[in-house]
Amino acid sequence: MPSGKVYLVGAGPGAPDLLTLRAAALLKQADIVFYDALVHADIIALAAHAAHIAVGKRCGKQSTAQRFINKRLVDAARKHMHVVRLKGGDPMLFGRAHEEIAALKAAGIDFEVVPGVTSALAASAEIAVSLTQRGLARSVTFVTPRVGEGEQPNDWARAVMSADTAVVYMGLGQVASIAATLIERGMPPSKPVVVVVNASLAGRCELKLKLRDLHRVSELAMDGPAVIFIGDVYSEASVKALEAFPQARYA
């Protein structure tokens, strides 16, 4: 059966002007676009001649099952020449790209992955703190404590404990357990932490605190995609301290 090609495209951290030129060009020639919940509307609008299909997933909200997304990509490629699967950040980092790639391979569908700027890099640029620093931080780990339904627990804390700098994705709703787990594993309660919500967007929030106070972030009712940075490189970060944020400011 003749088929088109599926492009797994990284939409970046949020800001439309951080989209890559290659991604923008593919959107302009797309016949159909399947996009995540956090992709900016201005990015989707670049696909002016395409059908737009929302297939996003948000924690605690109704979302599209991954197996259904996989099938829709295969079906779309058998009808259209240019199919874009638009993912927030980079497709290859916590984007479940491996599942979609496996489905496309099994169906004999041609595909290509187009990288995007992941939120850890955008947030690092905004707070002007390098993930690495000579003599202080030579290793970085990206983790998430989130576990999907039916999945085995992952030992994310082991990776954090073994790295000089850690970036926690999708952890805003688990700040208390993240802090408790790391302290129980032996991380100093005074370890510097920076939380960035809505990196690259106008409504971004940045806040600096100690690991022992990380649980207090839940009091602020902050909303949006977040990254949590942990490491000694953040001791001198020029970011507002937790005490500067009134309770429920971001409710």
Image (cartoon, rainbow, N blue to C red):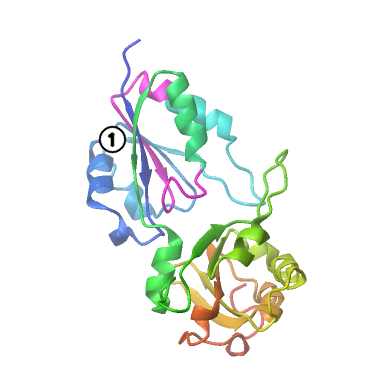
Which residue shows up at 69% across the image and 72% down it? Answer: 218
Q: Relative to the observer, which residue lies in front, 224 or 101?
A: 101
Q: Is residue 152 above or below residue 83?
A: below
Q: Relative to the observer, which residue lies in front, 226 or 152?
A: 152
Which residue shows up at 67% across the image and 44% down it? Answer: 148
On the rendered structure, is 84 left or right of 220?
A: left
On the rendered structure, is 175 left or right of 112?
A: right
Position of residue 21 measured from the top left corner of the image (x, y, whole percent): 22, 51
Instruction: Give neighbour class at mark 1: few <14, some 14-19, many 20+ (Cα, 10 Å).
Output: many
Locate the N terminus by quadrant. Answer: top left
Provide the residue designation for mark 1. Answer: 30
Point out the residue furthest to the top here.
1
Position of residue 185 measured from the top left corner of the image (x, y, whole percent): 74, 68
On the rendered structure, is 208 left or right of 179?
A: left
Verify whether residue 219 appears in magenta.
Answer: no
Q: Can residue 94 be seen by looking at this rendering? A: yes
Segment colored magenta? 74-95
Query: The residue under label 1 is which amino acid type?
Result: Ala
On the rendered structure, is 185 left or right of 249?
A: right
Locate the C terminus by quadrant. Answer: bottom right
Query: Tag 1, which secondary structure?
Result: loop
Tell me which corner region of the image, top left, top right, bottom left or bottom right, holds residue 134. bottom left
Position of residue 26 measured from the top left corner of the image (x, y, whole percent): 26, 40
Which residue shows up at 69% across the image and 66% down it? Answer: 178
Q: Is residue 234 above or below residue 182?
A: below
Total marks placed: 1
Q: Can residue 200 be seen by looking at this rendering? A: no
Which residue shows up at 31% across the image and 13% down it? Answer: 2
